[in-house]
Image: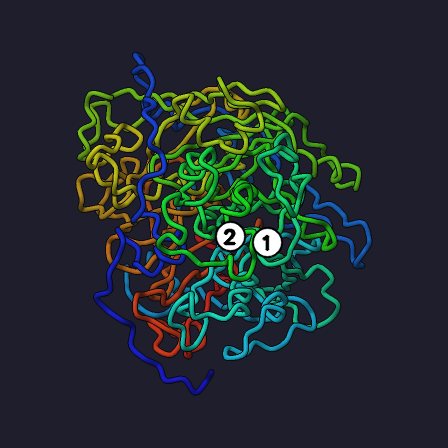
Amino acid sequence: MSDRPRLLPLLGTPRHGSRDAMTCLYRCGNACDHPVPNTSDNAYFGDVVNAEVSRRGVVRAGAVGALVLGFSGAAAGALAGAAPAAAAPVPPVPPAGQPTAAGRRPGSGALSFKPIPPNTLDTFVVPNGYDQAVIIRWGDPVVPGAPEFNLRRQTAAAQAKQFGYNNDFVGVLPLDKGGKRALLVVNHEYTNEDLMFPGFTSQDALSVEQVKVAMAAHGMSVVEIERVGGTGQWRVVGSGRRPYNRRVDALSSKFELTGPAAGSSFLKTAADPKGRTVIGTLNNCAGGVTPWGTVLSGEENFNQYFVGGDAAPESEKARLARYGISTTARYPSGSRKWDRAAERFDLAKHPNEANRHGWIVEIDPFDPESRPRKHTALGRFKHEGANVIVARSGHVVAYMGDDERFDYLYKFVSDKKFMKGDSWVARKHNLTLLESGTLYVAKLDQTSAGEIDGSGTLPSDGAFNGKGRWIKLVSGNRSYVDGMTAAEVLTFTRFAGDKVGATKMDRPEDVEPSLLTGKVYVALTNNTNRGVGSNPAPDEANPRTANRHGQILELVEDRGDNTADSFRWSLPIVCGDPADPSTYFAGYDKTKVSPISCPDNVAFDATGNLWISTDGNALGSNDGLFATATEGPERGHLKQFLTVPVGAETCGPFITEDNRSLFVAVQHPGEITGATVDNPASTWPDGDYAKPGVVVTWRLDGGPVGS
């Protein structure tokens, strides 16, 4: 609507912790207003480790031979309907401690860009020497023949062919060896009806068709993109057949359940008596790209979409409550009331439907006719995402976080081994790797338990660190949790973690291994309940009371083996204002680092530097993207690379293998209490009303991003 007046952003609006109340309402169903789902009394630390683990010892842990999905992978099949060709993995990278092609250790390169200052501008800000462009935004066509977006005449049929709302994870998979064409794969986490529908007043006032529009705006998009000339810029391919372009949604898309819990009594419904086919995917947050050329997507805050928990069978109420579903009200705070459009969301009638969400979804972007799968072998919880590495043994290891206050870290190790090569036989085999394996949960021990007082003061050994172990929950059809079958462990994984005494963490979100070193990095976003009232006290991995700013955890598997059952951990970054004595940046001079708050997603560039995006900056400025070396003298020198517009969150950072293009998703711009389509708090990106979108950033001189 180019004639819409531009209004000033709203100020002084209420916030839940560091997020605006509007984001809390739509993104997670006001989770902070509800009791903490984890009420277990399991010990959140084991015995205190006697031997001190020095920070330097953790930094210099061993090597890993990992396989990477390179940006120069083999071309996909050119014709729709043809057997899709596999993306060819590049050879193993040099192990940690060995020189890279550039002559330095992985992740040890200095970042040359000048950091941008914190700000509250309603624009997308990048450093000098860089440029940026919006690739795609809400409502843009995805499927060839999609109708032009019409804000005031939205339909579910149109939205099912258009780019969805509130993009989160971003993955870019090559279509050719020259790096000129690729597939952009994006999650659509949630909708905000206040900012979607002119004249919105309440969920009850929406028409059923508008509810279906919102359902269609969830899910995922696959879009063909092309490089602009020889630069780092990319754009959507706007003509031709585009056979891979695709939308999956929460309205009508079918998903196949795989793994040991598929077909169990917990997943059967009247509409699906076999318990193997699910309609829709909900609240898709982060994800990952696999070495065999698929995308993993995490179903996160699925609880908010269900109603009628008060009338669910009494035998199911404890299970529902552990996953944040109200069992005392038909329509809890933040309810979307989707039962008006689809009866399956009414737990009074279909109590098992909630069990069919909260999984890791795998989609094959190179096969548009394939049905996406929900892998029960990876467990069910509020998945932020899943990221995969191929261990030296050839087994695939997936790392995952449960994004809830006081919930857990997990990893999955496949039964089968990754098959090298780009043949269709190899790819067909690799597509089964996540269907069977062993699921673990993390228990962290500490070296300085008696010194943790909640202030964030470093222990006398100069580091927050310790050892830990992976506790086996289930392997194939065998449960290792007393009193629970394998199907129960996988469907109600949070209970399994409670029973074995897993460590309660400060909202573990993105968990990603470095493909250069094998070290694993965890974004612990925040936890304002830590040490408050009867909630668990601070500990060495979560060292601050009422933690507003979060921290980054580094996990190093023993012997550099990602299949190991023990590890060492440390906190290289404890976030916040560097002037705050409770912050820590791997020992680097804090007068030279950028302030950071609420880490959410992590990513790596081609040289192994760590990139961190934020969600809900509690320091008062816009969210952004930050980078630091993970090795060498620049370790901990955190620098802010970009900021997103007012009210927005920085999501899904993805850097191409040639290091020339950096993609991010700008989620929920202008999501500030009181904002509407007609009275926007942000006019990004087009100057009329706020639209979530995906942005690419590149260096003007064509050089590598960051360095």
Above or below for 461 versus 494: above
Determine contact: label 2, label 1, CB under 8 Å: no
Residue 69, percent from left and from top: 62, 43
Q: Which residue shows up at 27% across the image and 28% down it?
A: 540
Dot 2 falls on a residue whose secondary structure is strand
Q: Residues within 10 Å of mark 1 (few under 14, many from 20)?
A: many
Q: Amino acid at mark 1?
A: Val
Above or below for 542 versus 549: above
In-image side of 410 versus 462 (left or right): right
Q: Which residue shows up at 72% across the image and 55% down it?
A: 368
Mark 2 or mark 1, whichever is nearer to me: 2
Which of these two is toward me, 337 or 137? Answer: 337
Residue 603, percent from left and from top: 47, 46
Residue 28, percent from left and from top: 39, 51
Per the model, the C-alpha gap separating discs 2 and 1 is 10 Å
Which of these two is toward me, 439 or 186? Answer: 439
In this picture the colour scheme is rainbow
Q: Amino acid at mark 2?
A: Phe
- Examine the image and state in which quarter residue 423 appears: top right
- Examine the image and state in which quarter residue 268 appears: top right
Residue under label 1: 172
Residue 491, percent from left and from top: 53, 33
Q: Residues within 10 Å of mark 2 (few under 14, many from 20)?
A: many
Q: Which residue shows up at 78% across the image and 58% down it?
A: 78
Which of these two is toward me, 213 or 27? Answer: 213
In-image side of 454 versus 575 (left or right): left
Dot 1 falls on a residue whose secondary structure is strand
Residue under label 2: 169
